[in-house]
Image (tube, grey):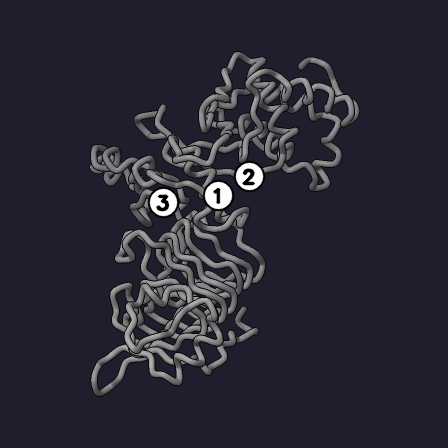
């Protein structure tokens, strides 16, 4: 790729040939990242920073980079579900040369992938020990590397796709458990133990803010303008935080592969795999169960304009305009009483469901709209009636 291209048409001729090669596959997502390696095990990836993620786009830039890597002797394996390669100075130079004619536009804010390559070039000059990678995912299967796990977590947190759409099976076992310092850099726990005395006596022991496999969302992602996250420890990377969402301090928490798809007030726990709809309010200390915490593997979705009262527990999917009163638990096996007049009103809202008796298990009511779950203060029985209360978030807060 020594030829200098002057127009996009000239570049496209090369790209067409690259993409037409036998075995070539377009990645479904890809990115260039800075890899943070172990202090002692320098070959081991602990975390990755991606500045720009391509999700079903950027295919021309992907082909340019793949061609540059191949010309520099790297083997891009298209037969697997993913391919992660080190980005060397030589391959980087070739990729930048091919896109050189686009640099004036890149300086004006266009061509994000070229901006990343140019930033990597500068980083390599200032830190010769810095490590960079080119990560390509060809199939949405279980991730095999730290780099691919991070790429999927970024795609979720950048709102490029919704929770539960990416395969993250086994991600927890792929990621190492590390200490995170105040600069969001990972450190091996065993290295800290072995060097604890020296570091402390030298006054160089790092300030550790957490020990976890997953980093914090705000250490990697710039959220939408009208998102408020009042405590960075409350949201993991891989959370999908939609515009207008507020995550309060205290009992609030949003796990990876979970989150919101509209303006939502969160003062409770949104467990992994949980999706919360537009206009809903998760009250203080409320808990929405994840697939590993009592739902028998059934993912929970909360519909639009729902209210989960303080300290309530929700273990079934809810439709739109539902209310779970404060302090009660609605689980798959919870026995729920519905009076005749409410069954008639609810049937009109949910025409596909047969309200033909008084008692239902919580799981039977999963996904239905307009339910208001209460607890009878005298008998303790959980009841459901037609929800008559409109749930509206304070527009000034979102």
Which secondary structure lies at badge 2? loop
Q: Mark 2 touching mark 3, by CB under 8 A?
A: no
Of callouts 3 and 1, which one flags the residue occurring earlier in the amino acid sequence?
1
Q: Which residue is mark 3?
A: 214
Q: Is residue 256 above or below residue 30?
A: below
Corner quadrant of residue 39: top left
Measuring from the top left, give residue 125's x and y in whole percent.
55, 26
* C-alpha distance separating marks 2 and 1: 7 Å
Q: Is residue 66 above or below residue 261?
A: above
Toward the viewer: 81 or 393? Answer: 81
Q: Mark 3 touching mark 1, by CB under 8 A?
A: no
Toward the viewer: 198 or 78? Answer: 78
Residue 333 relative to residue 18: left or right: left
Q: Mark 2 touching mark 1, by CB under 8 A?
A: yes
Tally of numbered discs: 3
Q: Which residue is mark 1?
A: 154
Residue 33 relative to residue 311: left or right: right
User: Mark 2 Cα within 10 Å, few/some/many (few <14, many 20+)?
Assistant: many
User: Mark 3 Cα within 10 Å, few/some/many (few <14, many 20+)?
Assistant: many
* C-alpha distance separating marks 3 and 1: 12 Å
Measuring from the top left, give residue 187's x and y in whole percent.
32, 37
Which secondary structure lies at badge 1? helix
Q: Which residue is mark 2?
A: 53
Which secondary structure lies at badge 3? loop
């Amino acid at each position: 790729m020594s030829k200098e291209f002057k127009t996009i048409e000239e570049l496209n001729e090369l790209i067409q040939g690259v993409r037409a090669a036998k075995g070539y596959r377009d990645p479904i997502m890809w990115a260039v990242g800075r890899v943070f390696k172990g202090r002692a095990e320098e070959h081991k990836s602990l975390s990755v920073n991606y500045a720009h993620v391509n999700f079903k786009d950027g295919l021309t830039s992907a082909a340019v980079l793949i061609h540059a890597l191949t010309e520099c002797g790297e083997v891009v394996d298209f037969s697997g579900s993913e391919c992660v390669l080190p980005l060397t100075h030589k391959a980087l130079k070739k990729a930048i040369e091919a896109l050189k004619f686009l640099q004036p536009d890149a300086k004006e804010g266009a061509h994000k992938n070229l901006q990343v390559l140019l930033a990597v070039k500068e980083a390599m000059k200032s830190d010769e020990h810095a490590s960079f990678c080119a990560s390509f995912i060809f199939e949405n299967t279980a991730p095999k590397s730290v780099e691919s796990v991070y790429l999927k977590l970024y795609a979720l947190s950048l709102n490029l796709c919704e929770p539960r759409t990416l395969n993250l099976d086994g991600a927890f076992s792929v990621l190492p458990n590390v200490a995170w310092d105040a600069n969001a850099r990972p450190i091996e726990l065993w290295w800290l133990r072995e060097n604890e005395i020296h570091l402390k006596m030298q006054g160089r022991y790092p300030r550790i803010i957490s020990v976890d496999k997953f980093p914090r969302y705000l250490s990697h992602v710039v959220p939408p303008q009208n998102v408020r996250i009042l405590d960075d420890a409350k949201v993991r990377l891989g959370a999908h935080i939609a515009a207008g969402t507020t995550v309060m301090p205290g009992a609030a928490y949003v796990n990876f592969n979970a989150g919101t798809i509209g303006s939502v007030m969160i003062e409770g726990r949104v467990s992994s795999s949980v999706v919360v709809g537009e206009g809903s309010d998760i009250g203080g200390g409320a808990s929405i169960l994840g697939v590993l915490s009592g739902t028998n593997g059934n993912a929970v979705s909360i519909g639009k304009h729902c209210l989960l009262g303080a300290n309530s527990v929700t273990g079934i999917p809810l439709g739109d305009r539902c209310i779970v009163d404060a302090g009660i638990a609605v689980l798959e096996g919870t026995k729920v009483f519905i009076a005749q007049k409410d069954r008639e009103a609810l049937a009109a809202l949910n025409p596909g469901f047969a309200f033909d008796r008084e008692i239902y298990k919580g799981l039977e009511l999963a996904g239905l709209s307009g339910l208001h779950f209460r607890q009878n203060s005298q008998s303790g029985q959980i009841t459901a009636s037609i929800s008559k209360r409109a749930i509206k978030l304070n527009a000034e807060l979102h």
